[in-house]
Image: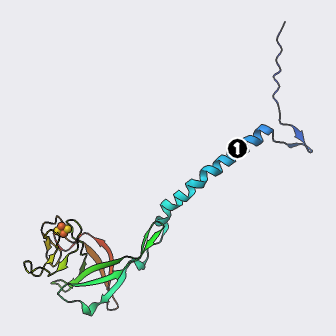
Amino acid sequence: MSEHKDHRVQQPTRANGGKREMTRRQFLGYTLGGTTAFLAAGPVLPMLRFAVDPLLQPASDSDWVRVVEESEITDEPKSFTFVVKQIDGWYESEPTLEAWIARGEDGKIFALNPTCKHLGCTVNWNSNPRFPNQYYCPCHDAHYTKEGKNLAVSPLPLDQYEVKIEGGFVYLGSLGPNQLVD
Ligand code: FES
């Protein structure tokens, strides 16, 4: 007795004037696939946006902060505070920063950050009689020259702000390694 197999392929049914209709299995497949993709994209897209959003922010002149009139700056370092706007991802803040600003021997204005490079205490200018005309840190006795060179305890010089002079005012920019000393 010969076995007779039916090799006909099942075609989607046609109705409505020859338009191809979707089978129940195809319909369920599309529906479940679409729902899964939608649910998966929900938590991923905001994370992706969160990660790249700061990169999409245009750089602007607002990175510079006007701090003081140029005429106020002398050879003797003076402390000035200023407020900056910080955007860290979605978090915005306006911390108050401090800079010691002075003129160098060449007359150029420079600005140093008062954070001690030993363990982060705050230095002051000319505050210890043992170290006249130097920045001194009260925490562990670090001291620095007027240009921020580390003389003891601290492994690094004081950090330096970018400076620009415009319209008779001193503007401070980003903070970086000290370029005044070796
Ligand atoms: S933190 Fe300034 S000397 Fe240690």
Residue 109 visible in this rendered orientation of the protein: no
Residue in the image at 39% along x and 77% along y: 63
Where in the figure is residue 41, as x and y percent of width and height? Answer: 60, 52
- Quadrant the N terminus occupies: top right
Give the residue furthest to the left. Answer: 130
Which residue reaches farthest right? 17
> Which quadrant of the structure image shows residue 179?
bottom left
For residue 48, above or below residue 118? above
Q: Quadrant of the C terminus?
A: bottom left
Drawn side of residue 46 relative to residue 125, left or right: right
In the picture, measured across the screen, residue 144 lies left or right of residue 80, that is left
Relative to residue 134, is residue 97 drawn left or right?
A: right
Instruction: Classify 10 Å Cα crowding around label 1: few (below 14), some (14-19), many (20 and above).
Output: few
**Pointer 1: what residue?**
32
- Coordinates of residue 164 in the picture (x, y in percent): 31, 82
Image quadrant assignment for residue 21: top right
Residue 157 on image: x %, y %? 18, 69
For this orientation, the residue located farthest to the front is 139
Scheme by which the image is coloured: rainbow
